[in-house]
Image (cartoon, rainbow, N blue to C red):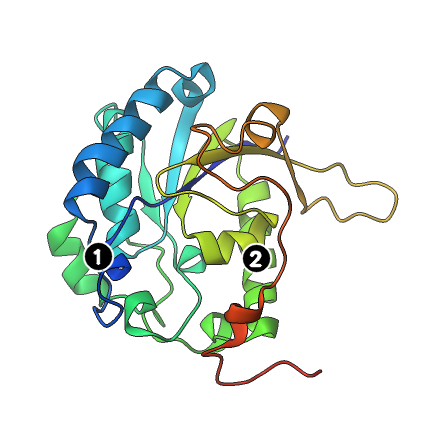
Amino acid sequence: MAPTVILIRHAEALHSLDFTIRDPPLTDNGLKTQCATLSTALQALPLAQEITLIITSPMRRTLQTTSASLGWLMDRDIPAVARAEWQENTVNNIDIGRPVSELVEEFPKFDFSTVDPIFPAKEGLYEFSQEALTERGQVARKWLKERKEKVVAVVSHDGFMRVGICQRKFGNADYRIFQFEEERDGKDGLGLVELEETEKNGGGLGTCLKGTFGWLRNDFKYMPKKPQA
């Protein structure tokens, strides 16, 4: 049976203040306030106590969010695995990661062994194009669906989760809970269905915009290869 998935957006990062920083870290507010609030909420959530695998984008802001908000699980030896599929979309500095050799030094508690060797290059599956992002979302969901864990937490980015994963928007350091759809009526079973408790509330903490969202006009602003009209 496919796992239940808790999707989490990273906390506020410095690119909110400076759009030129490469792989920016969290702000003090994001690290000390937002992550603390998220951690408290998740520790009080019975489902989160059943998490036996944490997946994170190998970007600094997601790794810091994972450490600060899910560290209580990592302290129980729940594995935290970085996967390149969950990185953010664009080719702007803020969305380009750093070499794994540097990340291992800064974040020694994470497993980087399965990060695609192509990372942090934005090419192939990680190209900033509508086609590649659609494919990357399918790859990420297929990999996730095949996991044997009962509950998996994923820490990622608003843009990628919206266009590639679940068609939802996320507030900083907020979460939504999903289950995989059934394989029937022509559906491949890779779609995610949000649980009512987070959908109606606008996320677990209530900071997410309600509704479904596809591609937005600004998504194409910096895209080198514009989609066909």
Residue 145, can we see it? yes
Viewer-side residue, 71 vs 148? 71
Residue 187 position in % (x across, y down): 80, 47
* 10 Å crowding of disc 2: few (<14), some (14-19), many (20+): many
State how far apart marks 2 and 1 are (Cα). Answer: 24 Å
Q: Earlier in the sequence, mark 2 or mark 1?
A: 1
Residue 1 vertical position relative to residue 163 in the rendered view, above or below = above
Residue projecting furthest to the left: 105
Residue 14 shows which numbered tag? 1
Mark 2 lies on a secondary structure that is helix
Residue 124 shows which numbered tag? none
Q: Which residue is mark 2?
A: 164
Q: Is residue 168 left or right of residue 10?
A: right
Q: Is residue 33 left or right of residue 200?
A: left
* 10 Å crowding of disc 1: few (<14), some (14-19), many (20+): many
Q: Is residue 113 left or right of residue 2?
A: left
Mark 1 lies on a secondary structure that is helix
